[in-house]
Image (spheres, rainbow, N blue to C red):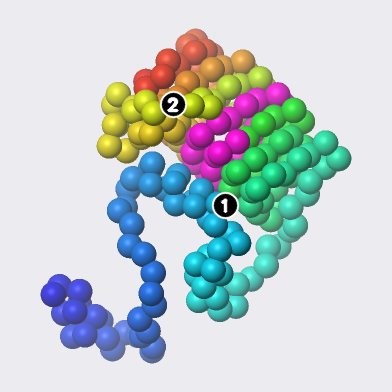
Amino acid sequence: SIGALLFDHILHTSFDFIEDIPGRTFFQNNLTQLYEKNLWLVSNIDSSEYNSIIKRFKGIRSADKPAVIRNEGVIKSSIISGGSQIDGYVENSLIFKDVNIRRGARVINSIVMNHNRIGAGSVIYNSLILPCVSERAKNSQNIGEQVYIGSKNSNVCNQDFPDQINSGITVVGMDAEIPNNCVIEAGCFVAADLPHHKLRDKPRLKRGSSIF
């Protein structure tokens, strides 16, 4: 096979140590699968399979900063990464590092990746929020206040990317800016680097649609 040729005859001198590690192979470049497999970690954190996976990673370094759950913050069946600050409600979700979820905001059945800042009173259901990597002031937010993203129950596919975004999930791209009071329904796709004014001019994104 190509893999055997590559590792046995071409690259073998570049490695000090090679070990077969049992695991899973997933399709790449599939956003729905990215969402589902990250959420699998949340649902199976107490399982023997999860623990056997973690044991394979030797010397995992703890987070530089702990997560902070404020007085009004509530966490239920979720994983919260270091550096995050939670003033709202998080349920059955995976929150990556340095995420800020402000007072009254609710995140349910969702994956929120690094450095996102979710405004007060916003609600996120069944969504994949990709990282926010642009420089932001500490008190700024890329997802505004009273924003509603996703849906409790939907199986809708995105009209533009049905193979990528389906099963009712909503995807917000990297560094997208969502202004206050926007509604982004199930199966929607918000493109990366979307400027603030695009959704300010179109504050409701109907299910299965996209904005670029």
Please, what is the three-letter code of the amino acid marked with disc 2? Ser
> From the viewer's perspective, is residue 108 above or below residue 64?
above
> From the viewer's perspective, is residue 22 above or below residue 134?
below
Q: Earlier in the sequence, mark 2 or mark 1?
A: 1
Asked if one can make out residue 82 in the rendered structure from this viewpoint, the answer is: yes
| Image quarter hosting the N terminus | bottom left
Asked if one can make out residue 195 in the rendered structure from this viewpoint, the answer is: no
- Front residue of 54/121: it is 54
- Front residue of 96/166: it is 166
User: How far separated are the C-alphas under marks 2 and 1?
Assistant: 21 Å
Q: Is residue 118 left or right of residue 168?
A: right
Looking at the image, do the residues carrying marks 2 and 1 touch, with CB atoms under 8 Å apart? no
Could you tell me which residue is drawn at 70 percent across and 48 percent down? Answer: 84
Which of the numbered marks, if any, corresponds to residue 30? none
Could you tell me which residue is drawn at 59 percent across and 44 percent down? Answer: 93
Could you tell me which residue is drawn at 76 percent across and 40 percent down? Answer: 74
Task: Name the residue at the front extreme.
Answer: 47
Please, what is the three-letter code of the amino acid marked with disc 1? Val
Q: x and y percent of residue 154 in the render?
A: 44, 26
Q: x and y percent of residue 21 in the render?
A: 39, 77
Q: Which residues are magenta?
A: 108-132
Could you tell me which residue is drawn at 74 percent across and 28 percent down? Answer: 104
Judging by the rendered image, the residue that carries numbered circle 1 is 42
